[in-house]
Image (cartoon, rainbow, N blue to C red):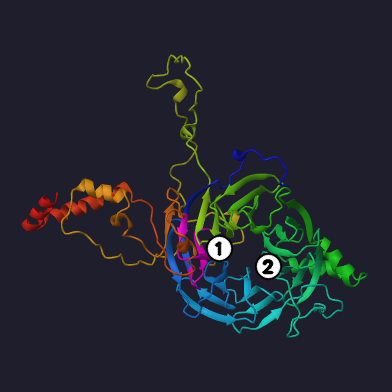
Amino acid sequence: MMNAPIIDPLQGDFPEVIEEFLEHGVMKCIAFNRRGTLLAAGCADGNCVIWDFETRGIAKELRDDDCLAAITSICWSKYGHRILASAADKSLTLWDVVKGEKIGRTTLQQTPLQARLHPGSSTPLICLVCPVSSAPMIVDLRSGSTTVLPVSLPDTGNGLAPPSRNKFSDGSAPFTPTAACFNKYGDLVYVGNSKGEILIIDHSKIQVCGVVQVPGASVIKNMVFSRSGQYLLTNSNDRTIRIYENLLPLKDGLKALDESNSGLDELDGVEKVKTIGSTCLSLFREFQDSITRVHWKAPCFSGDGEWVIGGSASKGEHKIYIWDRAGHLVKILEGPKEALMDLAWHPVHPIVVSVSLAGLVYIWAKDYTENWSAFAPDFKELEENEEYIEREDEFDLMPDTEKVKESDVNEDDEVDIMTVEKDSAFSDSDVSEEEICFLPADPTPDAPEQQDKCVGSTSKLADSAQSGSPLSDEAGQNGHAVNQSSSPLEGMDNSAAEDTGGTRLKRRRRPSDKVMELQVEKVKKSSQRMKPSESFCSINHR
């Protein structure tokens, strides 16, 4: 619970400060690939951008001339070959990541709030979509056909949701935006409805196999599984995040569900699916702020499932709450005074990435401090000076205490440098499937240099670079990483902060000393090749 005492932050490996931020237009949503080496972001102009998270540079831009509306969600395929983007113009677009080309585009009848590719296939062609005012549906990206999933228990055995008394003017039944997600291998779909129920659905047969009642019976807004598939997170309208333990086997969960279903033939209807549901999920933990009672936005697990994060949905604040899985609040991260739009935890490292209302992506990392004792096992830090008495043989050439023992390792054995050890974090990886971890960077031409014919002294050159002259800013590209030392909100007026699609002022981190030296040498060489009249002009200018 949130009112539990805050534990010692030194015990956990979680982010603490903003390390830097990324800027490219107005970004709306983000998603890491499986390895965390690439970060995809959907923008307000309908395009997508892929960042190389190691270099913090843009690896590829996915430009869609057919879409001008904001991207509402973005999702990677299992091995990173494809990206699915949903947009506010009711479209779904499937991209080939390497080629940067569209594989297919489908237009729905409702605006998709979230779309997720099937996690069990390396090249998925079906996805799960949660529209804004319709029930969740399975969409075939090849044919564009849709299959609507049930959002409540059927009164009859036909598997359809019961009709609603209140209808829209066109006769269609209204729906509260419903949350849904695949399980780890995609054979089951978990749907959270407006009654506070979790429906476990066999999407191949469109059949409700089990149901779990969530305490409070509030609208379920978000659902997400942990990376391992062992825990399910739900975010309800009662301002509570709940963690459920998955009691089904990770593989062949549908088969185990069918076996339990066949053993309950004496039960009928609602009682049967509720009994089955109790064997599928078990409530593990609840998280809430009992003081401020804030709503939560984009909650998710850490890569190893040990931590749970949730963003405050309050306007005008960028707060991220971090709990351990035992339920203790361990950290509250406070960012700029702007609303939080999306959150993602790095799959491997203790790094959190958040999206602000202004369209900036903030990278939160651990605040590491120097620990000199880590460089030498026998190094000891002293609180105060102590008198040291040396050993008699301490400075001998070969003291007895430092004689090297003979190694048992056979130096003639061949060392295997080709076999890749299997990482436990990616135990479900198929070694026969080639996974995309990095992309070749797309080079963009530099802006033409505007240099004065009369070159000043090298000291002026260095001063101009440190003071933010065009020399240090001329390399502004479409997207880049910016250091934390200069806040993205400083010097930005209201019109720039409210920009929704245009190109904004872009800054880079300060050039390194090596880059400065190369630039100085370049200017020196150019000044030596100058004509006498230009040199005379430079002297007079000084």
Name the quadrant containing residue 315. Answer: bottom right
Q: Relative to 7, does residue 422 appear above or below in the rendering?
A: below
In the rendered structure, which disc, 1 or 2, sits on the residue that comes first in sequence?
1
For the question of whether residue 435 can be seen, the reply is no
Kindly state the secondary structure of the residue where label 2 is placed: strand
Disc 1 versus disc 2: distance between alpha carbons?
A: 16 Å
**Label 2 sits on residue:** 182
Q: Relative to 370, does residue 250 appear above or below in the rendering?
A: below
Q: Position of residue 507 (x, y in %)?
A: 39, 57
Q: Relative to 2, does residue 261 appear above or below in the rendering?
A: below
Kindly state the secondary structure of the residue where label 1 is placed: strand
Q: Position of residue 519 (x, y in %)?
A: 24, 53
Name the quadrant containing residue 254. Answer: bottom right
Nearer to us: label 1 or label 2 = 1
- View extreme (front): residue: 494
For the question of whether residue 80 can be seen, the reply is yes
Could you tell me which residue is drawn at 16 percent across and 59 percent down? 453
- The magenta span reads 21-48
Q: Position of residue 501 (x, y in %)?
A: 47, 70
Q: Is residue 279 left or right of residue 403?
A: right
Depth check, front residue: 258 or 102? 102
**Label 1 sits on residue:** 31
Q: Position of residue 188 (x, y in %)?
A: 72, 69
Q: Does the stretch in magenta take in 482?
A: no
Q: Is residue 35 left or right of residue 226?
A: left
Depth check, front residue: 113 or 264? 113
Could you tell me which residue is drawn at 38 percent across and 67 percent down? 442
Could you tell me which residue is drawn at 54 percent across and 59 percent down? 356
For badge 1, the amino acid type reads Ala
For badge 2, the amino acid type reads Phe
